Amino acid sequence: MPAPTVMQPEAQGVVHEPPSTGAKVGAGVLNVVYVPGKAIVCGFGTIVAGGFMLLTFGSAYREAVSFFNEGCGGPWLLTPEQVQAAPKSVQLEY
C-alpha cells in the first residue's frame, strides 16, 4: 500500500506565478556576471581560509570556515524565480 502524501497548506495571499519572460532573460544576463564573480570570491575565500589555517596552525578553523562559506556558500546560479521575487523598488532612508 503506498504511503499517503501530505499536502502542505499554501500561505494565504501567496500566488505562485511562473516566471515571466523578462525574469528568464534577466537571470541569463545576470548570470554572465554573477557566476564568474562568485567563482572569484570563492577562490579568494579559499585562499584566505587556507592562509588562516597555515598561519594559526589550525587554531583559527572557525574563521577559516567562515571565509570559505561566505564566498562558496549559497546558490551558484540565479534562477528566474529569484529574479522575479526581487523587490521592484528600494527605499533608502538616511
Image (cartoon, grey):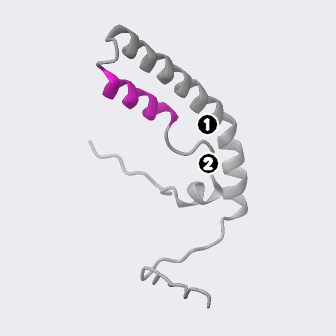
Q: Are marks 2 and 1 in contact (CB under 8 Å)?
A: yes
> How many C-alpha atoms fall within 10 Å of the one at disc 1: few (<14), some, or many (≥20)?
some
Kindly give the residue lying farthest to the left in the view shown: 94
- Kind of residue indicated by mark 1: Tyr
Where is mark 1, residue-wise? Answer: 34
- Residue bearing mark 2: 78
Judge whether 16 appears above or below 27 on screen.
Answer: below
Find residue 28 and report its horizontal and vertical position in percent: 71, 47
* 85 magenta-colored: no
Left or right of residue 38: residue 92 = left
Tell me residue 17's x, y (percent): 61, 73
Figure check: 9 above or below 21: below
73 or 80, nearer to the observer: 73
Quarter of the image where the C terminus is located: top left
Q: Is residue 72 above or below residue 25?
A: above
Alpha carbons under labels 2 and 1: distance apart: 8 Å
15 with respect to 18 (left or right): left
Q: Quadrant of residue 56?
A: top left
Q: Is residue 93 left or right of residue 40?
A: left
- The tag on residue 14 is none
Name the residue located 42 percent from the left edge and 51 percent from the top edge. Answer: 90
**Which region is colored magenta?**
60-72
Residue positioned 47% across, 77% down in the render: 14
Question: Horizontal and vertical percent for residue 38?
Answer: 57, 32
